[in-house]
Image (cartoon, rainbow, N blue to C red):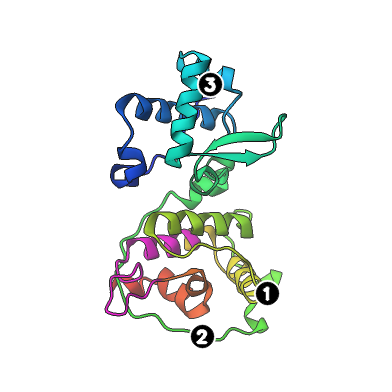
């Protein structure tokens, strides 16, 4: 089966990447291809050398240069106690990209949005509606993991704060949003944030939307209703 992976335009302005010599840059891109074929990690060094058509000494030198440049990481695990992966792979190449048709549909639509000052709200447990009242688009609901991965992917690209910890309050609100809103509405809300320069910090306060903003009932409603278009 053909494999694909995300390659971000930010590489154009990343000094770690742009300071690579042409040969190392080529090998780095090929290593990304290898990682995509091996669930986000690189194979054994001799397999890397064979795939790149270089000898073991050149391969070790390449890996050393990329490690120093911060473009590959040594992780725990693997048959020898460690394994190598491209830096930031799990944050940029989450598995739900290709896992189900449900998540593919999550990314199919697009909508132009603009800006309106955000507000806050206080949500009670009554906002978590019963299963009989849940909205549905004919699909299984998104999981909390998929929502967090989608947010962290957006945060990576737009330099917003990533989700590090799910507090009890976040868990409650996330449960409410998942139960009340369809996959398409989640996609619309996330794309509204991504397309809004205001929500991404272009305002007189330097304020940026965060995960808590997304989970607020009033914020989410405004995002999906197109208020930020205006």
Q: Residue at x 56, y 86 (%)?
A: 122
Residue 213's place in the image compared with 83, above or below, is below
| Total numbered labels placed on residues in the image | 3
Residue 230 among magenta residues = no
Q: Residue at x 48, y 46 (%)?
A: 92
* SS for dot 2: loop
* SS for dot 1: helix
Expressed as whole percent of the image width and height from the top left, the position of residue 106 reads: 49, 52
Q: Nearer the viewer, mark 3 or mark 1?
A: 3
Provide the residue designation for mark 2. 121
Q: Residues within 10 Å of mark 3 (few under 14, many from 20)?
A: many
Expressed as whole percent of the image width and height from the top left, the position of residue 123 reads: 59, 83
Disc with the residue nearer the chain's start (3 vs 1): 3
Quick one: 85 or 137, which is closer to the camera? 85
Where's the C terminus, which quadrant? bottom left
Expressed as whole percent of the image width and height from the top left, the position of residue 128 reads: 65, 76
- Where is residue 197, by image quadrant? bottom left
Q: Are marks 2 and 3 in contact (CB under 8 Å)?
A: no
Provide the residue designation for mark 3. 48
Residue 136's place in the image compared with 109, above or below, is below
Tell me the CA gap for discs 2 and 1: 17 Å
Q: Is residue 25 left or right of residue 55?
A: left
Disc with the residue nearer the chain's start (2 vs 3): 3
Q: Residue at x 42, y 83 (%)?
A: 119
Where's the N terminus, which quadrant? top right
Q: Residues within 10 Å of mark 1 (few under 14, many from 20)?
A: few
Residue 206 among magenta residues = yes
Provide the residue designation for mark 1. 168
Q: Nearer the viewer, mark 2 or mark 1?
A: 1
- Start-end of magenta stretch: 186-208
Q: Is residue 117 visible?
A: yes
Quick one: 14 or 114, which is closer to the camera? 14
């Amino acid at each position: 089966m053909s494999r694909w992976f995300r390659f971000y335009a930010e590489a154009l302005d990343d000094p770690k990447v742009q300071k690579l010599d042409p040969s190392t840059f080529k090998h780095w891109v090929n290593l990304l291809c290898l990682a995509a074929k091996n669930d986000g990690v690189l194979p054994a060094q001799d397999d890397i050398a064979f795939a790149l058509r270089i000898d073991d000494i050149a391969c070790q030198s390449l890996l050393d240069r990329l490690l120093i440049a911060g473009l590959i990481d040594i992780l725990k695990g693997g048959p020898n106690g460690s394994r190598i992966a491209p830096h930031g792979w799990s944050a940029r190449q989450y598995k739900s990209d290709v896992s189900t048709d449900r998540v593919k549909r999550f990314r199919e639509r697009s909508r132009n949005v603009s800006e309106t000052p955000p507000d806050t709200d206080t949500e009670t447990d009554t906002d978590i509606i019963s299963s009989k009242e849940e909205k549905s688009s004919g699909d299984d609901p998104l999981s909390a993991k998929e929502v967090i991965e989608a947010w962290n992917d957006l945060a990576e690209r737009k330099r917003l704060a990533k989700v590090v910890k799910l507090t009890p309050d976040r868990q409650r609100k996330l449960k409410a949003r998942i139960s009340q809103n369809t996959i398409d509405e989640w996609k619309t809300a996330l794309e509204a944030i991504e397309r809004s320069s205001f929500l991404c910090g272009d305002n007189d306060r330097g304020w940026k939307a965060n995960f808590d903003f997304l989970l607020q009932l009033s914020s989410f409603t405004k995002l999906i209703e197109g208020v930020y278009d205006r």
